[in-house]
Image: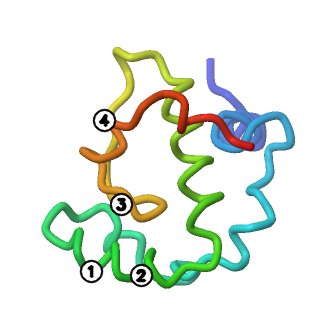
Amino acid sequence: MSVRPEIAYRYLMSVLFGPSGRPPEWRRHAACRGMDPALFADENRIAAAKTVCRSCPVQQPCRADQLEWESRLDARRRYAVGVVGGLAAHERRHRPNVERKVS
């Protein structure tokens, strides 16, 4: 049995972005918008990715959304990778849960 692509897409968007299924509005203003995502996933380019994040006007909501999303994942499936919201994966794994809540 195969799943129709539009259903799979809607499911993926709801997993990534919650019930609305749409990216948050702040993403339009992100410093990384339009950049190669590989920069933020490459463990050898963490400093370069963090430089972009430091100048980002929406760094805080980006970080908060990512920490909240990662906190919802089952611990067995959770693996943080890359730089998001100015934090590398190893930094996000060691953040207190209190900071993982979106205001």
**Which residue in the rendered view is the most extreme toward the right?**
20
Residue 25 at x, y = what percent? Answer: 80, 65
In primary-sequence order, the first of circles 3 and 1 is: 1
Apparent side of residue 82 relative to residue 64 in the rendered image (left or right):
left
Measured in 3D between alpha carbons, the distance from the residue under mark 4 to the one under mark 2, in whole angstroms, is: 22 Å
Measured in 3D between alpha carbons, the distance from the residue under mark 3 to the one under mark 1, in whole angstroms, is: 10 Å
Residue 59 at x, y = what percent? Answer: 56, 67
Identify residue for label 4: 94
Q: Which residue is at a point 27% across and 80% down the rendered structure image?
A: 48
Apparent side of residue 5 relative to residue 44 in the rendered image (left or right):
right
Identify residue for label 2: 52
Q: Callout 2: few (<14), some (14-19), or many (20+) C-alpha neighbours within 10 Å?
A: some
* Mark 1 residue element: helix
Identify residue for label 1: 48
Measured in 3D between alpha carbons, the distance from the residue under mark 4 to the one under mark 1, in whole angstroms, is: 21 Å
In primary-sequence order, the first of circles 3 and 4 is: 3
Identify residue for label 3: 83
Measured in 3D between alpha carbons, the distance from the residue under mark 2 to the one under mark 3, in whole angstroms, is: 10 Å
Query: Viewer-nearest of labels 3 and 4?
Result: 4
